[in-house]
Amino acid sequence: MKLACPECGHRQDAGERCATCSYDGMLDLANEQHVELLRDIDHRRRDKHSDRTRLLAVGISLAVVFGLWLVPGYWSWRGVAYPGLPFFADQWFFMIVIALGVWKLLGRTAPKPRFPYLDGG
């Protein structure tokens, strides 16, 4: 019987406590409900990271665009280099593009799966 620790991902053959982190609640890998729980733990970790990076990316994009507004001559350059769109639509577009770029870059720092052996064999 193979057991897995939901805290650290360590696998072991027997025992009530994890040999690595001493967590008391080993899950049986032969039980489909336990395997689903482990997959759900990994999924939640990825979602939490994605939510945090999305918020950080939006904050960075807002800071960059608002910072550009403080650069002397930005508003006059805006009318010369490209036509400014009504309701600051061009500024919204810049914020969205910057946020998507930062979000994709930060997405590369996603945590590795704690239980890679569930899908890989």
Image (tube, rainbow, N blue to C red):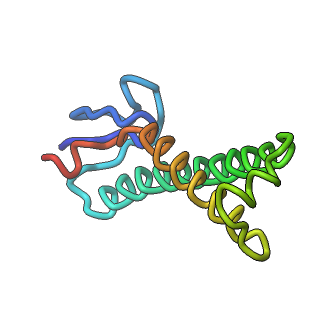
Q: Nearer the viewer, residue 3 or 94?
A: 94
Residue 10 rendering spot, x and y as whole percentages = 32, 32
Residue positioned most to the bottom: 86
Residue 23 vs residue 106, the one in the foreground = 106
- Rendered view: 10 above or below 75: above
Q: Residue at x 79, y 75 (%)?
A: 87
Farthest front residue in view: 80
Vertical placement of residue 75 versus 112, above or below? below
Where's residue 41, x and y in %?
Answer: 44, 52
Give the image location of residue 121, x and y in percent: 13, 46
Most foreground residue, 117 or 91: 91
Which quarter of the rendering shows the N terminus? top left
- Vertical arrangement, residue 111 with respect to residue 48, above or below: above
- Residue 36: % across, % down: 33, 61
Give left or right: position of 48 versus 4.
right
Residue at 46% x, 51% y is 46
- Residue at 62% x, 49% y is 57
Q: Is residue 57 left or right of residue 29?
A: right
Q: Number of callouts in the render?
A: 0
Residue found farthest to the top: 20
Q: Residue at x 41, y 58 (%)?
A: 40
Q: Which of the 4 quarters of the picture holds residue 90?
A: bottom right
